[in-house]
Structures are given as C-alpha cells and as structure tokens.
Image (tube, rainbow, N blue to C red):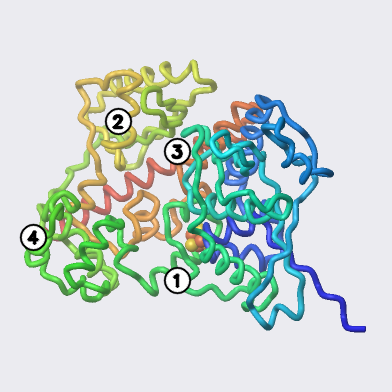
Amino acid sequence: MGKSKQRLEISATDVFEYVKCPAFFKRYVSSGKRLEECYDQYYHDIIFQSGKDYELSEIEKFSLIDTTQSLADALRNKTISAIRIKPGMILKREITVSLKNLKKLKTICAIGRPDLIIRNKDTNSFIPLDYKTSLSLFNSIRFQLYHYCYILQKYDPNIPYLGVLKSKKFNTIFLNLNSLKLDWEQIINKIILIKGGRISESKIVREDIKWTKECRKCFFHTTCENIVKSNLKINNLPGVKERRFQMIYDIGIKSVEELAKTDSKVMWEKILKIPKGINVFGREFTVKQIIGTARAFVESRIVILPQKLKPLNIKINDGFFDCEYIDSKTNPEIFSISLGIIKSDESLSLKNWFANNSSEVETIVSSFYDYLINKGVKRLFGWNIKSADIDKLVKISPLPSEINFHDLFYDIIDNIAMPVLSYRLKTVSKFLFGNQFQDKIQIGYEAVGLYKRFLETGNHEHKERIIEYNKKDVIQTYEIACWYEGLCKEYK
Ligand code: SF4
C-alpha cells in the first residue's frame, strides 16, 4: 500500500493575505503563529473585532436559512433568498494542482465560508457575500470572493463567478470575478509552495514586498523598509504615485540613479509636452523635490534644494502643537491636543487637553485656544497642519485671529530632500535623530484605536498612552524646527 496523501488546505483568508502582501504571508506562514498573533492590537481590533461586529449587525437584518448539512438542497430551493453557513462549519473543495512535484504528495483543498450566500435577483443564482469595514484592500477582497465561488460550485456547478461586497462606507457592490481565473490559479500555486514548505521559509525577496500605505500599519514595517531602500524603485519615492511614475517612465527615466542625474528644467519641459503632465505634477518645483529625493538616496545624504532656506527665528513663547482626532468630513472629533511652549531655557513646557467623551471635544478646543491667548502665544508650529489639524480645528471652532499657525512641513519639503520613503513627521524625525523621540505608536490610526478602547473600557492606561504619544509628536516637531534653524544658520 502506498503512503496516504497529506492534506493541504488553502483558505480564503490565505488568498486574501497573499494578495494583500506576499511578504506578510510568507512571514505569517513561517512563524507558525495564528494570523491574529501577526497583527498588533490596533490592527487586530480593526480587522478582526470591528469586522465581526459589523458582520453580526448586518446579518441580523436578514431572514436566513441556517444550514450546511443540505447546502446543495438549499441552493436548489427557489424559495430561499439567503443562506448562512452554520458557525464552525467550513466548506471544502479539492483543487486540481498543476505543479507536478506537489501533486504526488498532497491532497489540496480550497476551504472557506462566506459571511452569507445570497440570491442575486437579476440572475436568480446564489452568490457569496462578504462584509468588510473598509475597501482599502479591494483586490484581496475580489480574490477572496473568487475563492468562495470556486468552492460553492462543488455544491452547485451553476454558481457564477460573481460576488457581493457589503461595506460600511459604500454599501453593496456587485463584482464580476470572471477575469480572475488565471491569476487566482497562479496565486494558489504560490500559496501551495509556501504552505507546502517548498519556498524556503523566511526568505523575503523584493518582489514579495508591496510597499503601500498599508505598510505603515504592519508589524514588519522596519524590515521591509530596509529591503525597499536597498533596492529602491522610482515609485517608492515620496510624491511619486502611479500617474507620476508612469510619466517619468514614459520620458525615458527608468531608475532612481537616472532620475538623480536628471536636470529638473529639462525634465519639466518634457513633462509639459505630455498631455495632462502639468496637472499631474502641478509645478516645476515638484520635479525638483522628486529629483532631490532621488539624489539624496543615491548619495546617502541630505540635499539642499535651491529654494529660499529661510530661518524660522524661533523664540521664547512660540508654541508647538499636535492633535489626535477621529476623522470625518463634517464632524471631526479631536480627542487629544498637546502643546509645548518654549521657555526661557529653550526647553518646552508641555500641556495636554483630552476629551473623556465626545461631548468634551468642543470644550477642549476652546480651552486650548484660551490658554494660547492667555499665555500670549503669537506663533504656533505644527507638522502638516494645513491639510490635517487646522482643517479639523476650524470645523469645531474658528481659529483665534491673534495666532499665526505655521506649517513646518513646508519649510522642510520646500528646502530639503532626505533619503526617506515619506516626509511623515516620524520618518523625518527618525532619519534625523534615530529612535530618540519615537513612540511605540507609529501612526495616528493606532491612537484612534486606543481612544475607542478607552471610551469602551474607561481604562486610564489607554488615555495616558495617547497623551504620551501626542506629546512626543510635539517634541519631534520642536526638535526638527531647531535642527532646521541650525541648518539655515550654517547656510547663511
Ligand atoms: S511592511 Fe508592507 S511589504 Fe512588509 S510585510 Fe508588511 S505589508 Fe508587506
């Protein structure tokens, strides 16, 4: 008798995670941990907890047939409009594998359970539905739904490659998944190799890394950042998104090294000749900034851009501030404001305002303004405040006219290029000062997650963590301002 075949299962979550980021997936599989353990607390809450809460609240609205024992029968029943797979039950369908070396060893199954299976009124066929709190990983969601369709066809071969997505923000979206077949098969082959141990465990190559804004929330950010930096591509540079990247490529610049040697005037003239080139880049100076950052990387140094390097003339009683908020177009909730005022010994006197609930938001904003006025603060610095903090403050209460709000972010990006992958406050601070002023919390979203937990639990440790993080942002802004001031003096 031959050896019985080992079984390898590929879940819809595997597909979701692999499409999201192959590097993350490799690390998760090789760690031997449960997926939840590969996310930090904040991400865990968003992905696993609030996603579940949303799903449950939505499912309550349906009248359901709760069955799997007779899923094939239920799918044939013309009177049923929605089916929910019993909790704990997983659907399975064997996958025919094209990889010869794995074929002999394992039985490979696609497994999963969609949140719901609903009848599509237009086609009268059943299709899988998934609930998501956000659409930020849209491509992963499409492949996850394709995976469900593949499994459901075992129970009813007429089920089409169609899926439904229901999200808090966009309500219901129907997706035609037909075109995903070949890509899905390739993804499955890759996952088989990884889960089957055929791709050596922790070897992450540059091709595995999807360097997106999601990376800011990822546990493995620093390791990937180093790999990205050592094999930098033009589209990894700050300010170069898809359309700009395409235009740079179209004018014949293919590498960061080539970009670093390019004359900004020549490049700008070429861009002007491309239809919509001026709309995509906006102004010539953007080209200078991008070339400057490319040079900074190639030469591993700070590059001074030919702008007006103008000192800030920081003085006693100037203030530095930062807000943490829950974003909303009309009703932002600022829940923490930290302020540092320069004392005579050039250190900062720090203070914080914290909203213990949403009814205190307005109070903390007006008390922050009153304090500034009483202390005679005339100038208030912040980082990237024009598009963020100020925009939120004015929606809650008009800014006090006696105070000049100054965005330090523009002093930096208009005058200096650094070898950094973004000009976020923490990234710039880390580049200039190492880990000195860094906090465990790395992004504002995490503070929002902590705040929500504080509101639910009243746990003061969460509040203290937010305040500490918020104050560290103020300190980092101040330190960057002092560094910039020193640089201006040097170049005077
Ligand atoms: S940091 Fe980004 S590229 Fe790296 S594993 Fe995480 S999501 Fe993937």
Q: Identify the element where label 3 is drawn.
A: helix
User: Helix, strand, or loop for circle 2?
Assistant: helix
User: Residue drawn 56% across and 36% down?
Assistant: 450
Q: Which mark is residue 227?
A: 1
| Marks 3 and 4 close (CB-CB < 8 Å) | no
Residue pointed to by mark 4: 273
> Which quadrant holds the C terminus?
bottom left
Q: Earlier in the sequence, mark 2 or mark 4?
A: 4
Q: Is residue 439 above or below residue 380?
A: below
Residue underneath mark 3: 470
- The x, y position of residue 16, in whole percent, is 58, 55
Q: Are marks 2 and 4 in contact (CB under 8 Å)?
A: no
Q: Along the polypeptide, which appears first: circle 1 or circle 3?
A: 1
- Disc 3 residue lies near ligand 1 with CB under 8 A: no
Mark 2 near ligand 1 (CB under 8 Å)? no
Please provide percent x and percent y for residue 27: 61, 66
Crowding at dot 2, Cα within 10 Å, few <14 / some 14-19 / many 20+, comes out as some
Amino acid type of the residue tagged 4 in the rendering: Lys
Instruction: Give the residue number, with chain letter if any, for mark 2.
Output: 390
Label 2, label 1: how far apart the Cα atoms are: 36 Å
Sequence-earlier tag: 3 or 2: 2
Question: Marks 1 and 4, Cα distance to the nearest angstrom?
Answer: 35 Å
Q: Point out residue 264 in the picture as x, y percentages from the top left corner.
A: 11, 65
* Apparent side of residue 63 relative to residue 174 in the rendered image (left or right): right
Cα–Cα gap, marks 2 and 4: 37 Å
> Which of label 3 and label 2 is nearer to you?
2
Precedes in sequence: disc 3 or disc 4:
4
